[in-house]
Image (cartoon, rainbow, N blue to C red):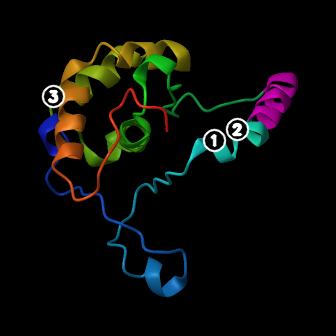
Amino acid sequence: FMHRLGVPEACEFVDVWGLDDELLAMVPQPCLALVLLYPSKNISSKRSHLHARVEAAGQVVSPDLFYMKQVDESGSACGTIATIHALGNTRQRIGLNAGPLSDFFSGCSGKSPEQIGAALLEQDALFESSESSAASGQTATPDRHDST
């Protein structure tokens, strides 16, 4: 999936089987990002409380941080969104090749997280590649429009 979008062949995603020292030792180094996927229904109330607290207190975020909001219209694209966050925050270090991802990131400059999330909806090449990859995997995946 990611190599077709411009990520160098030397980069890969691997499964992390646990957070114990012995299991983390199996993760190839250097490890530039960790993606944790979990059912959001179980944390929605806690997240809402934290969001309200941050909104009230304010927050200073580094301009070097890539962050986007997953808009409702993107459906069940959590894995894709997580992948884009991981690659967006490591793109200078890994050296993205020309392609749909580098084009997308170039177009995000100066936009809010909400605007970036909305712009992602227009990236047909990213979603088509993501869905093609998900369909060819070993695990049954929901359609991105399914409620998860």
Q: Nearer the viewer, mark 2 or mark 3?
A: 2
Rounded to the nearest angstrom, the CA distance separating label 3 from label 1 is: 34 Å
The residue that label 3 is drawn on is 99
**SS for dot 2:** helix
Q: Quadrant of residue 122?
A: top left
The residue that label 1 is drawn on is 41
Task: Indicate the position of residue 94 as horizontal and vertical percent values.
Answer: 28, 48
Residue at the farthest bottom position: 22
Which stretch did the figure color magenta? 48-58
Q: Is residue 3 depicted above or below 16 in this figure? A: above
Q: Is residue 115 depicted above or below 37 in this figure? A: above
Q: Earlier in the sequence, mark 3 or mark 1?
A: 1
Tag 3: amino acid: Gly
Label for residue 4?
none
How dense is the environment of label 1, judged by Cα within 10 Å: few (below 14), some, or many (20 and up)? Answer: few
The residue that label 2 is drawn on is 44
Rounded to the nearest angstrom, the CA distance separating label 2 from label 3 is: 35 Å
Any magenta on residue 120?
A: no
Residue that appears at 41% across and 31% down? 146
Rounded to the nearest angstrom, the CA distance separating label 1 from label 2 is: 6 Å
